[in-house]
Amino acid sequence: MSVSGSPPAADSLAVGAWGDAAVKFGNSVGAIAGFLGILLVVFLVAGRARGRLARPLAVLVFLGPAVLLLVVGLVAPLIRTVYLSLHNADGSRFVGGENFGWAFTTDSVQKVLVNTLLWLLVAPLAATGLGLVLALLVDRMRGQSVYKSLIFMPMAISLVGASIIFKFVYEARGKDQPQIGLLSQLAHAVGWSDPPNWLLSQPLNTFLLMVVMVWVQTGFAMVVLSAAIKAIPDEVVEAARLDGATGVRLFWYVTVPMIRTTVMVVLTTVMIITLKAFDIVRTMTGGNFGTQVLANEMYSQSFGQSNDGRGGALAVLLFLAVLPLVAYNIVQLRREREVR
Amino acid sequence: MTPNPTVPSQSSRRRLVAVPALLAALALTAACSNSSGGSGDGGGAAQTLTGDCAKYQPYAGHSGTTVTMFASILSPESDNLEKSWAEFSKCTGIRISYEGSNDFESQLPVRVAGGNAPDFAIIPQPGLLAQMVKSGKVVKPPAQTVANQDKWSPVWKTYGSVDGTFYAAPMSANMKSLVWYSPKAFAAAGYEVPKTWADLMTLSDRIAKAGGPKPWCGGIASGTATGWPATDWLEEVVLGTYGGDVYDQWVGHQVKFSDQKITTAMRTVADWMLNPAWVNGGYGDVKSIATTTFQDAGAPILTGKCAMLQQASFYEAQWPKGTKVAPDGDVFAFHLPAVNPAIANPVEGGGEFLAAFSGRPEVQAVQNYLSSSDWASSRVKTASGWVSANQGVDKSLYTDPIDKLSAEALTDPSATFRFDASDMMPAAIGSGQEWKSLTAWFAEGQSIQKVAGDIDAAWPK
C-alpha cells in the first residue's frame, strides 16, 4: 500500500509509538530516581539535625511516610467505605442503615452469611488440624524435607490456579457419558454408578470448595507447627516420658499446651485468609448454586451491579468480622514474643 | 551547625554538593521527556492527502496525535479491529492505542469514576452506556457521527441514546436468534429445517423419540457471567410470543417478570430447555446445563450426541478448527422461528457502541470514521466473524455464510428487531439477579413463581 503524499505522517506514527514508549520509560525511571533523590535529601537533613529538633525530626522522617501510606491506603478507604455503606447505589443519597437492613433481611444474603460462617469454622480447623497431624507424622519420617516440600507445594499455587485444578476434578457428566472429572471417575471405579453433579449439590458443594482452601493452607500450617514442635525442649518431653506419658497422652498434655499459641496464630491466620476467600468461589461457581460467600458477594455488588452502597455495607461487615481475629492474632504474637 | 564541634570531612562536603547537582539533573531529564511527550504538530494546518489516502481527507489535520480505546474485545479478535483501521491511522497520523480487558464491565466504571477515562470505550450494553452517561463524563458525538447513524435502522439509534439524547454510535451487530445444527446429520436422518415454532417442537419430539441423540444441548456456565445464555432463551421466547411492544415494556419493567405474560413465556422455555426428555445431549440431565460452559455446549452436535443448540452468531468461533460451517457442512444455523406465527420475523440481537469520553478534535475524527460505512466495510473485509447492520455495507463483502445470514436478518426491514433485554435492564438485574435466578432455575429446579418474584424484588427503585 502506498501512502504517497503523507510519508511524514507515516514516519511520525512509527516514531510516535517508540517515542511514546521511550518517554513513558524515561518518566518512570525519572520518577523513581526523583523519589529516591528526595528520600536521600530527607534522610540527609534528618541525619544532620542536632539538638532538641533531632528526635522529633527523626520520628517524623522515619514514621511519616509509613503513616502517610497507611492513611492513604487504609484509613481513607475505610472511611470512604463506611460512607458508601450509608448511601444509595451511586453514593448520591444518604439512606442510613438501609443497606445493612438489606444485608440482614434478604434470603440470598442470609445464605451468604451462613456460608461465610461455615467457611470460617470448617476450613481453618481442617487446615490447622491436618497440618498438626502431618507435622507430627512427618516429623518422625526419614527424608522429611521431601514430604514437607510436597505438602507445602500447593502454597505456591495461586488460589485461582488451585480452583481451576479442582474444577476439573469435580467436573461431572451424565452417568452414560464418558467422565472427564477425577472424582466422578473414581466414584464409577468403586461402583457408584450415579454420583451427583458435585458442584451443583448443596450443601456438599460448599465443602468441596473448602477442600481447595484446605489443600492450599495445610502446608503452611504444617511447616509452622512443625517448627513449633521442634522448639519444645527435649528435657520437657523426656520428663513427661519418665512420668509415664506416651502416645496420645504425651501429645495432648505436653505437645499441644507447649505449642498452643502457635496453633492459635495459625488458626486465626487461616481464618483471616478464609474470610477474604473470594478467588475460589469466583473461579469455581461464580457464587451460584448456593455457594456464595461475603467477599465475592461484596465484589459482585460493587463492581458487577454497581451498587456501591450494598457492596460497602458488606465490606464493613467483613471488616468487623476480621477485626477481632486480627486483634487476637496480634495479642497472641505479642504474648509469645514476651515469653521468649 | 555551631553546636557541633566536629567539622564536616572533605568527602561529606563533596557529597553535599553532589546531591543537589544530581537532583537538578534529574529534574532536567524529567522536564525534557515531558515536553517531547506533547502532542506534536497537532495544531498545524491540515495536509492534503493524495493517492490511497485521499479518502481520509475529512479526517486529516491531527497528525501525531494518539487516542486511547478501552474495550472487552481481546486478541485475536482485537487484532482484526486494529488491522481494520491501520490504513486510517497511517494516512491521518492519528494513532489509536487499543486496550482490551476481560474485566471491562467492572473496570470501565472504576476508571471513569477515578478520572482516568479512556478517550473511547466500546460498550456492548446499553445499560452500562446509560450508567456512564449518568456519570456525566460521556461526550456527545459530533454532527458527522450523528449523520452517519442514518445508515443504521432507526431502532439502533435509540439503543445508543440515553433519555432521548444520542451518545454512542453502534460499531457492530450480532444476531442471537439462531439455532445451530448439523446439516449432515439432519440429511442422514431425514429431518427438515423447521419453519415454525410448532414444527420445531414436533421435530424435537421426533428426535427425542428416535432414541439416538437428544434434540437439544445447552450450557449457561460462563464464569461470573453464568446465566446469560438462559436470559437469551427467555428473551427469544418473549419477543417471539408477544412482539416488540411487550418486550419493550418488559425491559422497562412496566411488565414485570411475575406478569402472567412473562411467566407464560417462562413456561414455554421450561417445556423446551428444561424438558428432561430433550436435554442435555452429551452432558447429562437438565441440571448439567448450569455447569456446562456455553463454549462447550455445542460440541456434542459434532459427535452426534445432540441435534440442536440455540446460540448467537458469534458461537461460530467456538467450533473446532476444520469444522465446515456451511448449509451442507458439519454445522450450520437456521433462524429460530417465532413462537407466535403472527409475529413477523423476530430477531434478537446485540451490538457494540462507541462512546467517547473526550471531545478533542482527533477523538471526533476517529469517532466520525468508525461510525462510517467505509470503516464498517473495511472491518468486514479484514476477517470474518464481524457483522454490521449498517445499510451502507455491501452484503457481497461477507465471506462467511453465518455472517451473511446474520447481516441479512439484521438489515431486513420486515424483521422485528430488538436488542438483548438483559443488556438494557439495570445492571442489578441484567447482569445480577436475572443471571442468578435463571441459573438457580436450571440448577436447583426453583419454581417459575420464585424465580420471577426474586428478579422483580431486586429491581432497583
Image: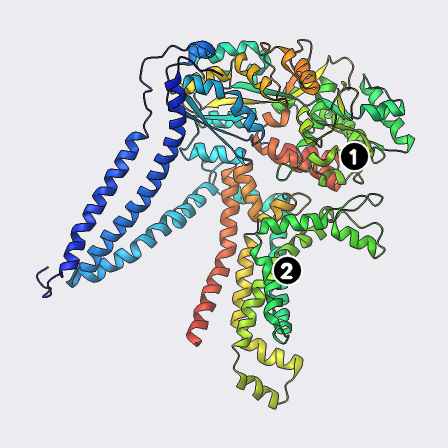
Residue A61 position within the rendered picture, expressed as x and y whole percent measured from the top left: 26, 56
Q: At label 2, which amino acid type do we have?
A: Val
Q: Which residue is mark 2?
A: A122
Q: State whether residue B125 is above or below residue A70.
A: above
Q: Which residue is mark 1?
A: B300
- Classify residue B282 by image quadrant: top right
Residue B410 position within the rendered picture, expressed as x and y whole percent measured from the top left: 65, 15
Q: Residues within 10 Å of mark 2 (few under 14, many from 20)?
A: some
The residue at 65%/84% (across/down) is: A246
Is residue A329 in sight in this rendering? Answer: yes
Chain bearing mark 2: A
Chain bearing mark 1: B
Q: Nearer the viewer, mark 2 or mark 1?
A: 1
Closer to the camera, A161 or B62? B62
Q: Residue furthest left?
A: B2
Closer to the camera, B438 or B302? B302
Is residue A92 in sight in this rendering? Answer: no
The residue at 63%/52% (across/down) is: A115
Q: Quadrant of the C terminus of chain B?
A: top right
Q: Is residue B333 left or right of residue B157?
A: right
Which element carries disc 1, helix, strand or loop?
helix
Q: CA distance from mark 2 to mark 1?
A: 39 Å
Q: At label 1, which amino acid type do we have?
A: Pro
Which element carries disc 2, helix, strand or loop?
helix
Q: Quadrant of the N terminus of chain B?
A: bottom left
